[in-house]
Image (tube, rainbow, N blue to C red):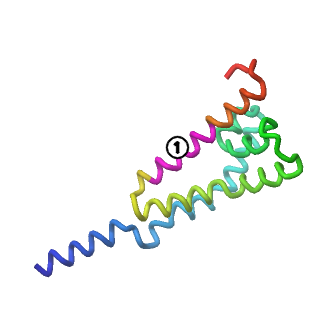
Amino acid sequence: MATAARSARGNRKRKSGSGWAAWIPFVLGIVMTPFALRAASVLALSGPGGLTLLYPFVQIVQNPVLHGAGGLADPLAQGIMYLQFPVYGLLMARITKSKGFWVALNVVVAIQGAGIGLAYLFAHFQNPFLRL
């Protein structure tokens, strides 16, 4: 009886993901940011399509369809470039604690995919004759 109670308590503790291992995605997001910025400088040479795949929210913020203030869009876009992957890591760390790693990874991939779709949609609204 006591063994079953201990194993149930151990399973609950393991499932909640409380520990340093749950914060590995956040640390990886911070470590990955300089490499992503370097990749963005290379992808910018290939045109806006390549950069949209890596940083779709930057393309959304800088799109003229939104009619945002021009002076505010550039600092906001730069902030997004530095914070996108640490925020993804923080989101994954929080979701991993309650739902598990694969659910957290799927949430982040879905957010990135929605951003890419929205960026391409805004690019199409900017120029409807653009072939996507």
Count of marks, rendered view: 1
- The residue depicted at 84 percent of the width and 52 percent of the height is 72
- Compared with 126, 9 (above or below) is below
- Residue 82 percent coordinates (x, y): 71, 57
In the rendered image, residue 107, in percent from the top left (x then y), is placed at 49, 49
Q: What stretch is highlighted in magenta?
A: 104-116
Where is residue 43? Give x, y as percent: 72, 38
Relative horizontal placement of residue 113, taking residue 71 as reference (left or right): left
Residue 79 coordinates in the image, percent (x, y): 75, 56
Q: Which residue lies furthest to the bottom in this view?
A: 2
Image quarter in which the N terminus is found: bottom left
Q: Which of 67 and 52 is in front in this view?
A: 67
Left or right of 106? Residue 46 is right
Quadrant (top left, top right, bottom left, bottom right) of the C terminus: top right
Residue at horizontal 56%, vertical 46%? 111
Q: Does the magenta stretch include residue 114?
A: yes
Taking the magenta stretch, the answer to whether it contains residue 40 is: no
Give the residue pinned by disc 1: 110
Residue extending furthest toward the front? 67
Q: Measuring 50% from the left and 67% from the top, which residue is drawn there?
A: 23
Quadrant housing residue 64: top right
Q: Is residue 83 above or below residue 123?
A: below
Residue sitting at the far left = 1
Q: Is mark 1 on a helix, strand or loop?
A: helix
Disc 1 residue crowd, few under 14, some 14–19, many 20+, Cα 10 Å: few
Magenta span: helix, strand or loop, mainly?
helix
Residue located at (67% from left, 42% from top):
56
Instruction: Give, as a three-letter code, the residue at label 1.
Output: Ala
